[in-house]
């Protein structure tokens, strides 16, 4: 290739450099993520078994604190494992996008090189120089098109990664809490702490961390107490059996049923009663998505049928589901 051709090919070479070496890394980041995810899932399974033993062998305030901390760690571990698999998929797609772009640019460079060599005998003539310049511009335009497409695809991958980031800080709900969100007492919680019928307030509910929240009415308070009694119950899709297996709507339907209020079976159908603003939620209000439902218990917390039933911070995001709002079944 002549000096003139080298100068004209330089922008294409720069484009190829922007794609790196054009070869896959020796260590596959997606494979590493998948391996880490498998380890995290194993840790979650072992931790869940150990925690179950701990719950029944150790009681008291210290035990409750330890269980709450362990529940949070296990929940974070499982969430990280789920995100890890999805991030691995994005990593694979991103790597394929970059490598594919590098291959296309390399082909464009080779194509221009072939044309330049064929035009070398004519470069002493103005017509030959014009043909060389036109070929260079045509190939450079093709290279820029590849770069634009790859950039657009990488932006889409970036958006997917952004969507996998943890949720923003939760709503504060009915009031502030000075303690970390807990998953409940070390045993199934139903003790109302002396705040049942005939006490100072039928609407007061003692939460697993020992604090007290006030429901809008006695029915909502009773529903919360019943829901809290199912902490630790395994998640079972379609489950409606307390103490054995519940799904999200099975938990809320059963809890309100025990309090004398009938709710529809499906989560998205439980958006009944009075809509409630996020900053005005009270114990017993339901957070409803198009495929999930949870019950607010107060102090910025809610109880829901995860795996197992547990107390979590109030939120409006849930694995990409559409949030329908907060609702008060008791009006």
Image (cartoon, rainbow, N blue to C red):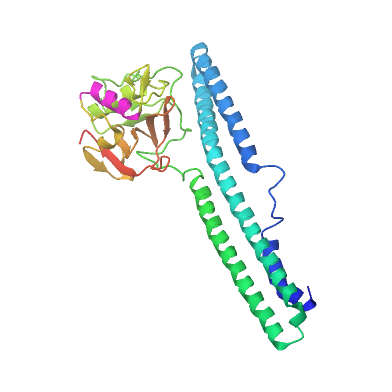
Residue drawn where x is 55% and y is 43% of the image: 89
* Snapshot quadrant of residue 6: bottom right
| Bounds of the magenta segment | 248-260
User: Is 187 placed left or right of 16 in the picture?
Assistant: left
Q: Position of residue 221 (x, y in %)?
A: 28, 27
Q: Nearer the viewer, residue 271 or 104?
A: 104
User: Is 327 placed left or right of 32 in the picture?
Assistant: left
* Snapshot quadrant of residue 34: top right
Q: Position of residue 266 (x, y in %)?
A: 28, 32
Residue 257 colored magenta? yes
Residue 201 colored magenta? no
Q: Main secondary structure of the magenta part?
A: helix
Quadrant assignment for the N terminus: bottom right
* Above or below, comparing residue 219 to residue 139 in the picture: above
Count of all numbered marks drawn on residues in the image:
0
Q: Nearer the viewer, residue 85 or 206?
A: 85
Residue drawn where x is 25% and y is 42% of the image: 275
**Camera sees residue 2:** yes
* Snapshot quadrant of residue 80: top right
* Above or below, comparing residue 128 to residue 186 in the picture: below
């Amino acid at each position: 290739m002549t000096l003139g051709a080298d100068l004209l090919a330089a922008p294409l070479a720069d484009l190829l450099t922007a794609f790196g070496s054009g070869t896959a890394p020796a260590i596959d980041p997606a494979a590493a993520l998948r391996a880490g995810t498998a380890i995290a899932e194993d840790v979650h399974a072992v931790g869940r078994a150990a925690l179950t033993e701990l719950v029944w062998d150790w009681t008291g305030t210290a035990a409750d604190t330890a269980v709450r901390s362990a529940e949070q760690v296990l929940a974070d571990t499982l969430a990280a494992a789920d995100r890890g698999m999805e991030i691995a998929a994005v990593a694979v797609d991103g790597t394929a996008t970059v490598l594919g772009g590098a291959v296309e640019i390399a082909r464009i460079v080779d194509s221009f090189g072939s044309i330049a060599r064929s035009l070398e005998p004519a470069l002493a003539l103005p017509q030959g120089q014009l043909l060389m310049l036109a070929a260079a511009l045509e190939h450079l335009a093709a290279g820029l098109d590849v770069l634009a497409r790859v950039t657009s695809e990488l932006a889409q991958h970036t958006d997917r990664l952004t969507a996998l980031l943890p949720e923003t800080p939760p709503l504060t709900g009915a009031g502030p809490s000075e303690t970390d969100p807990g998953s409940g007492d070390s045993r199934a919680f139903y003790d109302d702490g002396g705040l049942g019928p005939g006490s100072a307030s039928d609407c007061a509910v003692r939460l697993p961390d020992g604090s007290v929240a006030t429901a809008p009415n006695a029915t909502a308070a009773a529903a919360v107490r019943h829901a809290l009694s199912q902490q630790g119950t395994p998640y079972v899709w379609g489950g409606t059996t307390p103490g054995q297996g519940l799904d999200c709507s099975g938990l809320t339907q059963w809890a309100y049923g025990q309090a004398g209020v009938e709710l529809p079976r499906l989560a998205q159908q439980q958006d009944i009663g009075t809509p409630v603003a996020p900053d005005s939620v009270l114990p017993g209000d339901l957070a409803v998505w198009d495929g999930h439902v949870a019950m607010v218990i107060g102090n910025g917390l809610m109880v829901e049928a995860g795996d197992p039933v547990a107390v979590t911070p109030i939120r409006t995001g849930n694995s990409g589901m559409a949030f329908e709002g907060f609702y008060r079944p008791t009006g």
